[in-house]
Amino acid sequence: MLFKEKVNQLVQEALMERPSLFLIDLKITDDNKISVILDGDNGVNLQDCIDVSRVLEHNLDREEVDFALEVASAGATSPMKMPRQYKKNIGRKIKVVKISDEVIEATLIEADENGVTLEWKAREPKKIGKGKETVDKKEVLPYTDIKQAVVIITF
């Protein structure tokens, strides 16, 4: 079995033992630097990273292949890549850049395997008369129309 295949298999086995965690990214460079980025339905804590790291460390032989290993959580400001990340952030405010480069800051109302539903308020010109009015907007957006989406952190 190739080194990369073995690493991938070990990561999958480690995640099967922790069903609330899921893989965001797995990179293995030509010089065998392994980078594992995790997320979780309830977040990722340090112990989760340690546990996954230990599974890899204890099942890979440095005598066969010398490697460097990094296991980390997806950062709070990292773009969302998977439907599962959108689902865990329902009710939060997100910033979406659409494929058309339009930017929307909205509340994530729903998320499924196909896309998201967003709600926000916008200032638009009045239909009659001068000035602007605040209107409620709602849009169902397929993932294919999203270039990037991040959670807006508020304090």
Image (cartoon, rainbow, N blue to C red):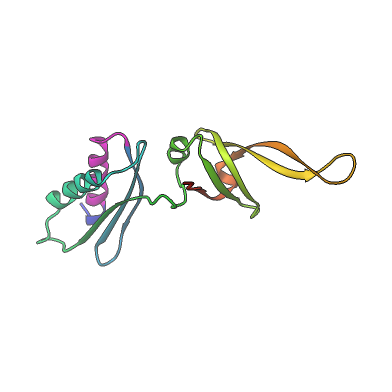
| Closer to us: 2 or 65 | 65
| Closer to us: 9 or 154 | 154
Q: Residue furthest front?
A: 155
- Against 119, residue 97 (above or below) is below
Q: Residue at x 35, y 36 (%)?
A: 42
Side of 72 where 141 appears, left or right: right
**At which x and y percent is residue 60?**
15, 53
- Magenta stretch contains residue 17: yes
**At which x and y percent is residue 146?**
57, 47
Q: Residue furthest right?
A: 129
**At which x and y percent is residue 134?**
74, 40
**At which x and y percent is residue 99?**
61, 52
| Closer to us: 96 or 99 | 96
Disc tally is 0
Q: Quadrant of residue 136?
A: top right
Side of 52 where 108 appears, left or right: right
Q: Residue at x 43, y 52 (%)?
A: 78
Q: Quadrant of residue 4?
A: bottom left
Side of 127 where 80 appears, left or right: left
Q: Which residues are magenta?
A: 5-20
Side of 98 where 132 appears, left or right: right
> Chief secondary structure of the magenta span?
helix
